[in-house]
Image (cartoon, helix red, strand yellow):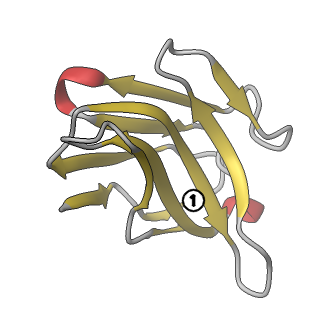
Amino acid sequence: QVQLVESGGGLVQPGGSLRLSCAASGSILSINAMGWYRQAPGKQRELVATITSGSSTNYADSVKGRFTISRDNAKNTVYLQMNSLKLEDTAVYYCKMIIARPPSHYEYQYWGQGTQVTVSS
């Protein structure tokens, strides 16, 4: 069994900052890619940022220069530092991890439960 638990969402004014965290627990051999996605009301879920096991990162054009994804492998945790937040960043944010599990070493995809980020004045 593997669980992803997110934290750090909330209400913030435009221009403000938030830091999201997502920690994985359970039967884990290793974690390959980690990522953050978001879904605004009435819209499809979209990629925000990803980070590989080698710490290569990729960002949606809409968040480049404002958001930073990072990971702590010792804690099985991925972070999303969000600065200069805009009204259009309002969404439910989900983390995703590709996790290798024992004993097979097969990789599986897991999602967090989602955390609400609301940017409003």
Residue 30 position, x and y percent, is 29, 30
Residue 24 position, x and y percent, is 25, 48
Q: Looking at the figure, which quarter contains the N terminus? A: bottom left
Q: Is residue 80 above or below residue 118?
A: above
Q: Nearer the viewer, residue 117 or 23?
A: 23
In the visual, does 94 lie left or right of 99? right
Task: Inspect the image, locate mark 1, and give the three-letter code of the amino acid beneath it.
Answer: Gln
In the visual, does 15 lie left or right of 101? right
Q: Nearer the viewer, residue 100 or 110?
A: 100
| Residue drawn at the location 51% of the way across and 15% of the way down | 55
The residue furthest left is 26
Can the viewer see residue 121? no
Residue 33 position, x and y percent, is 51, 33
Q: Nearer the viewer, residue 110 or 75?
A: 110
- In this figure, which residue is indicated by the disc labeled 1? 13
| Residue drawn at the location 34% of the way across and 45% of the way down | 21
The residue furthest bottom is 42
Q: Nearer the viewer, residue 74 or 20?
A: 74
**Label 1 residue SS:** loop
In the visual, does 44 lie left or right of 121? right
Task: Find residue 121 and report its image quarter.
Answer: bottom right
Q: Mark 1, residues whose alpha carbon is within 10 Å: few (<14), some, or many (≥20)?
A: some
Task: Find residue 87 and report its image quarter.
Answer: bottom right
